[in-house]
Image (spheres, grey):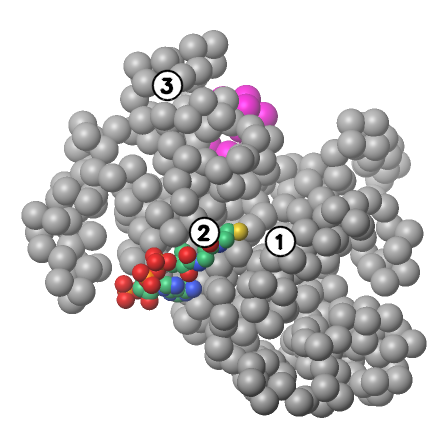
Amino acid sequence: MSLLDKIKKAGAELTDALTGTPTLLREIKEKAATRRKTIVLCEGEDKRVVEAAAKITAEGIAKIVLIGNEAECKKVAPDVDLTGITLVDPLTSDKTEEYANILYEARKAKGMTKEQAAEQAKDRTMFGALMLKAGDVDGYVSGACHSTANTLRPGLQVVKTASGIKTVSSCFIMIAPDKNNPYNPDGVAVFADCAINIEPTAEQLADIAITSAATAKAIAGIEPKVAMLSFSTKGSGNDDKFTQTVPKVQKATELAKAAAPSLALDGEFQFDAAVAPEVGQLKAPGSPVAGHANVFVFPNINAGNIGYKIAQRFGGYMAIGPVCQGFAKPLNDLSRGCSVDDIVATVAVTALQAE
Ligand SMILES: CC(C)(COP(=O)(O)OP(=O)(O)OC[C@H]1O[C@@H](n2cnc3c(N)ncnc32)[C@H](O)[C@@H]1OP(=O)(O)O)[C@@H](O)C(=O)NCCC(=O)NCCS
């Protein structure tokens, strides 16, 4: 790195510290800006989405297609400058018919008629997913005013999963308040699946592990060491005759190892065996992951969702996500309580996921 670059980096890090912006988040936005991907935001009827579209455009993070029309955007966000944003209205677009055909082809085996496809293609979230499927945009972000199921269903139905993956899942990128925690020296970790799959099977857990490792590398910028979490370490607590979660995590570990033999992945581990070298060495001697994990696959959504919120509230971690993974092309779901800055961050992450 040249001296000038070093000075620029130090200046940016100082600004991060003063503004409370995690360095990783700034880096994600900077990387996204170099890619200039086109992302569709499906909810032009939401003020926060219109404001985020303008902010993303002004900062050059991505090119934005906003589903909505000018009169409506002006009504919800009258002071926002829409220059540089492409507005598309499914009710008047000359693409709606072409997209209806794509939808019909994707769903006819499931009993969809041409008439139903023509009607459903006008729905904004479906229209956005069809734009993505058609290759007219590189990524999709929605959910500011729709539920997770309504946001992801169009993607599940038409975009489908990436080759070799059967499960769409999600993860949170957890950013530590500082790098002083000996159990998380990278200052960043990935937690999955905390938001989509409620009670994943062993096969689904294996998919979650493999896609989370890819997200850790591509978005969090860390070399993944994946721990398959449980209340048991290497058989120590294998007595759950009712729930059978330990055998499930053990089977998932085997399946993931077989599918991705070069990935640093191991289990099943209790959380302390996964992150504390002294416990890892004692309970799982010789494991390439025990004591040093940075990607954590929880056995179900209860454990994952509770776990990431404990890290947030007790540990002071910032959670970016949920980042959806496993789709053939990137789609992401916003929380209905999201802020403008959350939407900007989600668009930046989506741009990094795009090919
Ligand atoms: C992912 C989710 C949104 C899908 O809900 P849904 O639309 O009701 O799902 P359906 O069961 O109707 O399935 C729709 C299609 O998607 C597929 N699908 C569903 N979940 C999938 C997954 N995780 N991965 C891949 N495909 C999936 C189904 O196989 C089905 O495909 P098909 O119609 O071609 O046969 C659902 O799992 C869910 O609601 N999860 C919990 C979300 C939640 O409450 N999170 C808390 C927020 S923090």
* Viewer-closest of 9 and 189: 189
Earlier-in-chain disc, 3 versus 2:
3
Q: Is residue 95 magenta?
A: no
| Quadrant in the picture for residue 73 | top left
Q: Which residues are magenta?
A: 54-63
Identify which amino acid the numbered label 3 is placed on. Cys
Residue 108 position within the rendered picture, expressed as x and y whole percent measured from the top left: 14, 61
Q: Residue at x 21, y 38 (%)?
A: 122
Give the residue pinned by disc 3: 73
Residue 66 position within the rendered picture, expressed as x and y whole percent measured from the top left: 37, 30
Badge 1: how crowded within 10 Å, few (<14), some, or many (20+)?
A: many
Earlier-in-chain disc, 2 versus 1:
1
Give the residue pinned by disc 2: 330
Q: Residue at x 9, y 55 (%)?
A: 113
**Secondary structure type for disc 1:** strand
- For marks 3 and 2, give the one nearer the viewer: 3
Identify which amino acid the numbered label 2 is placed on. Pro
Please count the marks in the image.
Answer: 3
**Secondary structure type for disc 2:** loop
The disc placed on residue 172 is 1
- In three-dimensional space, the C-alpha distance between marks 2 and 1, rounded to whole angstroms, equals 15 Å
- In three-dimensional space, the C-alpha distance between marks 1 and 3, rounded to whole angstroms, equals 31 Å
Earlier-in-chain disc, 1 versus 3:
3
* Viewer-closest of 168 and 303: 303
Principal secondary structure, stretch drawn in magenta: helix
| Quadrant in the picture for residue 250 | bottom right
Q: Quadrant of the N terminus?
A: top right
- On the rendered structure, is 73 left or right of 296? left
The disc placed on residue 95 is none
Badge 3: how crowded within 10 Å, few (<14), some, or many (20+)?
A: many
Identify which amino acid the numbered label 1 is placed on. Phe
